[in-house]
Amino acid sequence: MFIDEKSLDDLKRNFQNSHASVMITNKNSVIEYVNSQFEKRTGYDSSEVIGKKASILKSNDTSSEKYTNLWQTILRGKIWSGEFKN
């Protein structure tokens, strides 16, 4: 699902206080937003990751098939939910 700026701003407000770790990327896998739980769980400050490719978080602990499934799912406009060990 690709959304306009206003909708993205609304999502950011909704996710800011979520108990889930949230990262929003554009279709090119560039990180546009992370919430405070992301910062707490990963140890990265938002300023360290926003504007960078999501692959900076990739570890060897997650199979490439899982990443492929993630991107195939979201590029079809579907919702992907899961965990990565980074």
Image (tube, grey):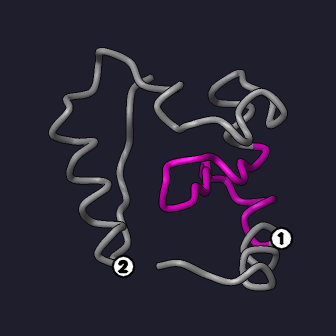
Q: Nearer the viewer, residue 83 or 54?
A: 54
User: Residue at position x 31%, y 55% from top?
Assistant: 71
For residue 46, what is the image quadrant? top right
Identify which amino acid the numbered label 1 is placed on.
Arg
Q: Is residue 3 left or right of residue 35?
A: left
The 10 Å Cα crowd at callout 1, few under 14, some 14 to 19, many 20 or more, is: few
Numbered circle sitting on residue 77 = 2
| Residue 31 pos. (x, y %) | 63, 47
Q: Secondary structure at mark 1?
A: helix
Q: Nearer the viewer, residue 82 or 27?
A: 27
User: Residue at position x 35%, y 63% from top?
Assistant: 80
Residue range corresponding to the magenta coloring: 14-36
Numbered circle sitting on residue 46 = none
The reply to whether the magenta stretch includes residue 71 is: no
The reply to whether the magenta stretch includes residue 23 is: yes
Give the Cα separation between the discs numbered 2 and 1: 22 Å
| Residue 56 pos. (x, y %) | 53, 25
Q: Is residue 33 above or below residue 15?
A: above
| Residue 11 pos. (x, y %) | 72, 74
Numbered circle sitting on residue 13 = 1
The C terminus: image quadrant? top left
